[in-house]
Amino acid sequence: MRIISLSTIPPRFATLAPTLKSLVSQKGHVDEIRLYVPERYRRFPDYDGTLPQVPDGVKIVRPDSDLGPASKVLFAARELRGRQEAQILFCDDDKIFGPNWAADLFAAQAARPGECVALNGKGIPPHRGKPGPFQPKAKRAGKLDLPLRARRLSHRLAYMLLRTGAPRPMRRPIAKSGYVDILQGLGGVVVRPDFFDDTAYDIPDAVWTVDDVWLSGLLAWKGIPIWLPAGIEEPLTTDAHDIDSLYRSTIEGITRKDANRASVAYMQERFGIWK
């Protein structure tokens, strides 16, 4: 069973179409696409219950609570717990995904059923903590990406000569497959439902807005590695990216930078990881 799962917030309802269209246009087999829209939002207490318009093939799910950005995966994981064959691919609501994106990530995780597979991720900064034990480490592509330049030149020539409508080639962020400490949900992440137990749903204020750290820390605590496969293109970013984005928000008096710092420290103290 292959599920694509994401969540959204009211200010972005009107900008979801490009993302959802790219999800229903995936070439690989997908059993269900779920969009989680909580009955109530912690960040948006005045939300009136209005729902976004979605294309055929997208199911809106209405949880009665708001788990913050972790809503994109944890509700699906809880519902599917015990389904060992189930894969959940969770992603952000401000991206346009290539047609083979889901198939590539599902296949990579199927080859490593006991591991989390993400398109993008990063290590723990040395001044913040100790990297996890899993080897080899993933290696990122350099800023001077000559293969990308060549692919974009070929794409441009094909458009000029043949007027092809193929999407513009995007960067492949991982040059060499390997492990990281922190998954980054922006590119897509595949997990199995049983990777998360009841602990995952008791999210403290210190990490409520920093789902990447919370989810990654829970995986590290349970000894589940995070693998980044090389060669998968990152998605395009839509206009929704700058609408009430967490990365530039101060929520309940906590800046994003402070939240990142506090979340790593919290995970180290509570779970004994990354130190």
Image (cartoon, rainbow, N blue to C red):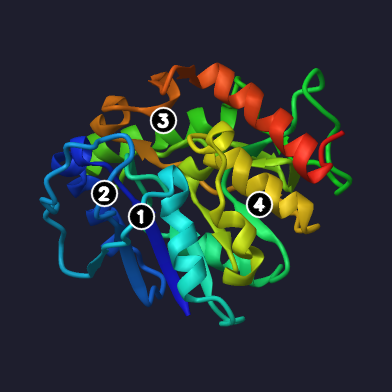
SS type, badge 4: loop
Q: What residue type is labelled 3?
A: Leu
Q: Which residue is drawn at 66% across and 46% down?
A: 216
Q: What residue type is labelled 1?
A: Ser
Q: Residue 65: where, in percent of width, then height?
A: 35, 55
Q: Is residue 165 visible?
A: no
Q: Residue at x 59, y 81 (%)?
A: 82
User: Could you give the CA–CA distance between mark 4 and mark 1, rounded to whole angstroms?
Assistant: 34 Å
User: Could you give the CA–CA distance between mark 4 and mark 3, rounded to whole angstroms?
Assistant: 25 Å
**Looking at the image, is 103 positioned above or below residue 135?**
below
Give the residue number, with chain letter if any, for mark 4.
229
Mark nearest the camera among 4 and 3 is 4
Give the crowd class for mark 3: few <14, some 14-19, many >=20 residues within 10 Å.
some
SS type, badge 2: loop
**Looking at the image, is 18 positioned above or below residue 141?**
below
Give the crowd class for mark 4: few <14, some 14-19, many >=20 residues within 10 Å.
many
User: Could you give the CA–CA distance between mark 3 and mark 1, rounded to whole angstroms?
Assistant: 48 Å
Q: Residue 17: where, in percent of width, then height?
A: 18, 48
Q: What residue type is labelled 2?
A: Arg
Residue 40's disc is: 2
Give the residue number, with chain letter if any, for mark 1.
65
Give the residue number, with chain letter if any, for mark 3.
153
N-term-proximal mark, 4 vs 2: 2
